[in-house]
Amino acid sequence: MATHLITGAGSGIGAAVARRLLARGDELWLLARDAGRAKELAAAFPGARTVVGDLAEPERLSWAFGHQALPERLDSLLQVAGVVELGTIGELTPKIWNDQLAANLVGPAELTRLVLPQLRLARGHVVFVNSGAGLDAHAEWGAYAASKHGLKALADSLRWEEKPNGLRVTTVYPGRTATPMQEKVHRQEGKEYDAAKWIDPESVATTILLAIDLPRDAEIKDLTVRPGA
């Protein structure tokens, strides 16, 4: 039985991954931003354990984890959570920049740092769910894309640094996926949302499981997933 720590399990891709792993009998630890969210996750995923810590406040994660039980070893850290706020460079305020950089980049970096000992013990796997915006930035996506380009750099550096410790690192770049975040994006773009046009979160979950289930003689470094025709 493998042990996984998942962020973003409350909806979308993270929830799909959590359901699949729980169904096959793995041990789940789910990161929740606050105690209320932790209760919701515990109810949604019976048998899973929760850890409270807000990725949007990375400077407080160490303190929060110091007051809670954590797994002794981790076979995978699945970083799925993220936030988005669109706007032109001329409109985006420092707060909007900082909020997205904290939740999408600095928070995941700090979470990784804090659980590296458990990952090293298990020769584990870190998966970053990035975005197509992490490869190509478009108008009004500047702050979000910057955070996701940074997340790619984090993953690439971590892969080189932790290779001697046996860690594998994978970045998944989903295109537009039918999640609550995508609904928000459509509202900001002023477009009608049709979930049927976009990738099912279960399909992205399948790619994540492919990466972590791959035999130890191989590693998927980068995996791009796009909506079908």
Image (cartoon, helix red, strand yellow):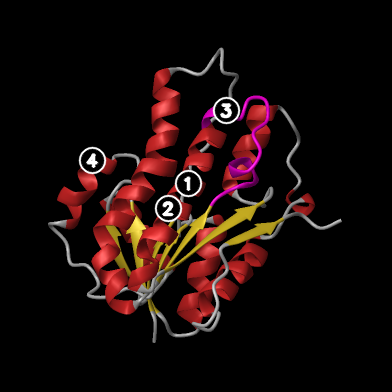
Look at discs 1 and 4 and give the one toward the viewer: 1
Asked if labels 4 and 1 touch by Cβ distance under 8 angstroms, the answer is no
Asked if labels 2 and 1 touch by Cβ distance under 8 angstroms, the answer is yes
Q: Is residue 134 magenta?
A: yes
- SS for dot 1: helix
Q: Which residue is mark 4?
A: 59
The span from disc 1 to disc 4 (Cα, nearest Å) is 20 Å
Depth order, front residue of 15/91: 91
Q: Residues within 10 Å of mark 1 (few under 14, many from 20)?
A: some
Classified by dominant secondary structure, the portion drawn in magenta counts as loop
**Quarter assignment of residue 103:** top left
The span from disc 4 to disc 2 (Cα, nearest Å) is 21 Å
- SS for dot 4: helix
> Magenta stretch?
130-143
Tag on residue 157?
2
Asked if labels 3 and 1 touch by Cβ distance under 8 angstroms, the answer is no
Q: Name the residue: 44% across, 25% down.
A: 96
Tag on residue 227?
none
Tag on residue 142?
3
Asked if labels 2 and 4 touch by Cβ distance under 8 angstroms, the answer is no
The span from disc 1 to disc 2 (Cα, nearest Å) is 6 Å
Q: Is residue 224 above or below residue 217?
A: above
Q: Which residue is mark 1?
A: 153
What residue type is disc 1 on?
Answer: Ala
What residue type is disc 3 on?
Answer: Gly
